[in-house]
Image (tube, rainbow, N blue to C red):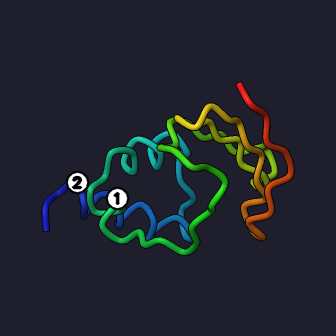
Amino acid sequence: MDRRKDFFYKILYERPYYGTNPVLLYNSAKNSKYLLQRFRCLQSLNAHNGCVNTICWNSTGQYILSGSDDLHLSITNAFTGEIKTKIRT
């Protein structure tokens, strides 16, 4: 196991006991191939007919704004998959 992977998991393991600096946790996690390899698809959202180019979550994490090659912006409920609004751009 390489040092970087060890360091990230060490921070997570020790967090309940010692707390952690959020910046340190962020920096150790970003661009981590080890975290990415553990991800899996939980749900697909069918809000677009083209390639999705950008997404942005709202502050509560309930809605996703997405833009696509189909020339639409969509606001979708991340939990139910319901499209709240679709706007042609």
Q: CA distance from mark 1 to mark 2?
A: 6 Å
Instruction: Say which residue appears at 52% left-offset and 43% top-offset.
Output: 52
Pick the front one: 53 or 5? 53
Query: What percent of the width, then of the height, locates residue 32?
Result: 31, 52
Which residue position holds label 1?
8
Quarter holding residue 19: bottom right
Q: Find the residue positioned furthest to the right.
A: 84
Q: Amino acid at mark 1?
A: Phe
Dot 1 alpha-carbon crowd within 10 angstroms: few under 14, some 14 to 19, many 20 or more:
some
Pick the front one: 16 or 32? 32
Left or right of residue 52, residue 65 in this image: right
Instruction: Say which residue appears at 60% left-offset and 41% top-offset.
Output: 55
Q: Find the residue positioned furthest to the top.
A: 89
Q: Quadrant of the N terminus?
A: bottom left
Pick the front one: 52 or 49? 49
Instruction: Say which residue appears at 63% left-offset and 61% top-offset.
Output: 46
Residue 56 to residue 35: above or below: above
Residue 51 to residue 47: above or below: above
Mark 1–mark 2 CB contact (< 8 Å): yes
Residue 43 to residue 28: above or below: below
Q: Amino acid at mark 2?
A: Arg
Dot 2 alpha-carbon crowd within 10 angstroms: few under 14, some 14 to 19, many 20 or more:
few
Instruction: Say which residue appears at 78% left-offset and 51% top-offset.
Output: 63
Query: What percent of the width, then of the height, locates residue 78?
Result: 72, 61
Secondary structure at numbered mark 2: helix
Q: Quadrant of the C terminus?
A: top right
State how many labels appear.
2
Query: What percent of the width, then of the height, locates residue 54?
Result: 55, 36
Left or right of residue 72, residue 83 in this image: right
Which residue position holds label 2?
4
Secondary structure at numbered mark 1: helix
Query: What percent of the width, then of the height, locates residue 43?
Result: 58, 72
